[in-house]
Amino acid sequence: MAPFSPGTPLPVDRLVALDRAHVWHPYSPMPGKATPYVVESASGVRLRLAEPAGGHRELVDGMSSWWAAIHGYGHPELDQAVRDQLGRMSHVMFGGLTHEPAVRLAARLVEITPEPLQHVFLADSGSVSVEVAMKMCLQYWQSIGRPEKRRLLTWRGGYHGDTFHPMSVCDPEGGMHQLWGGVLPRQLFVGEPPAGFDAPLDAGYAAELDELIEREADELAAVIVEPVVQGAGGMRFHSPEYLRLLRELCDRHGVLLVFDEIATGFGRTGALFAAEHAGISPDVMCLGKAITGGYLTLAATLCTGEVANGISRGEVPVLAHGPTFMGNPLAAAVANASIDLLLRQDWQQEVKRIETGLRDSLAGAAGVPGVRDVRVLGAIGVVQLDHPVDMAAATEAAVREGVWLRPFRDLIYTMPPYITGDEDLARIGAAVTAAAVAG
Ligand code: PMP
């Protein structure tokens, strides 16, 4: 394609042509087939398009940029936190050096997460934080003289990231990662817990899990799950009872417990962290996405003193991981500002308001032919179809309603920013319903 002059704005058709020719998007072919919507700017809960789509120049964001932008876009305090930090330094290496934004963030995360979590690894993406969690678990057992404990157990229907070790604990039949079946480490899977946040504990399921963990305990390093909400693997909700069960079984059989709270963390399910619904703590916890209010790429892996001390007693007494952009000061500064902003307000009240708004606005979707289930928890609303969704038709239907959604598989779902007003929530509900009709 012909070159373009740097510094000159690209006309939209040219930008789209260059995008399709050269730019890989998530889970997409190359050259690109779909025509992406071009976002010019974002403010509050609105994405401003370079050209109108479905009759709208602005779309209400129903996705929070995949769980992340909990305060919306362009929040003055978060913008200022980045500017202030930019004036001091945008990045320095973390080996042998440290700085206030990262130290403050680590201390804050320890303060707000369940108590036994004491040590924080600042990773640069969610997938890497899961890699690090797994490394911590395997290295812990190796360090204390149990190197044979290196397998992981998870329930089906999960999603933990796109790098290799996390892929090995994603749903093996879920459609995302079957390609790698022959290459990935072989982990152990058990069926996902019965659906429903309020579902009672199924004694048969509990017994099966107990038997499996007991049988495999000699080789089992850890159980890893997404607590309460399985996200990209199917947007399923389950009861916190199953988390209590896992905690009890892991303790009884000498296995570590890892919670991947990358999607659920920072209030999304109505508790600051989903583990709180169960009143228990994991040994290792992964955080990401909303940690910076969606501003910059950052994630964290927290572990207990016992895990960290175990690793430090080993033949190789260091956690062998160190990304170039570890503890990035800009990302850490905006994470601190985002957490301050969240906790300073009555965020529970706001998430409750969104839950009520979504329940009201999605009620009508239950009557749409082809809709199998409508479920809402915290600031998450899900409509599940009884057939695979026509992504393009469903997306276009939502855009015609002035809302940005990203349906996939048999799901049309929303997790709006916590600042979404009641009118916009109603609009999101109407768009989800329209997408269900179209898709
Ligand atoms: N775990 C969970 C539960 C997630 O939802 C995601 C992202 N969808 C990841 C891990 C991976 O995070 P990232 O995309 O930042 O690598």
Image: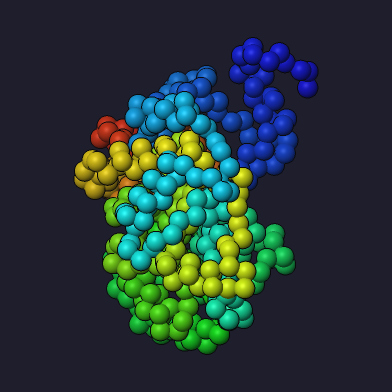
* Residue nearest the viewer, comparing 315 with 212: 315
Res 413 visible: no
Q: Is residue 70 above or below residue 139?
A: above
Residue at 58%, 63% (x, y): give it: 318
Residue at 58%, 73% (x, y): give it: 314
Residue 374: x and y, percent? 35, 53
* Residue nearest the viewer, comparing 155 with 348: 348
Q: Is residue 151 above or below residue 262?
A: below
Q: Quadrant of the N terminus?
A: top right
Residue 90: x and y, percent? 52, 32
Residue at 51%, 31% (x, y): give it: 89
* Residue nearest the viewer, comparing 117 with 248: 117
Task: Give the tally of numbered discs.
Answer: 0
Residue reaching furthest to the front: 96
Query: Which quadrant of the view contains residue 146?
Result: bottom right
Q: How is the image coloured?
A: rainbow
Res 108 visible: yes
Taking 137 as reference, is 163 left or right?
right
Taking 75 as reference, is 133 left or right?
right
Residue 227: x and y, percent? 40, 62
Residue reaching furthest to the right: 2
Residue 352: x and y, percent? 24, 47
Residue at 52%, 19% (x, y): give it: 51
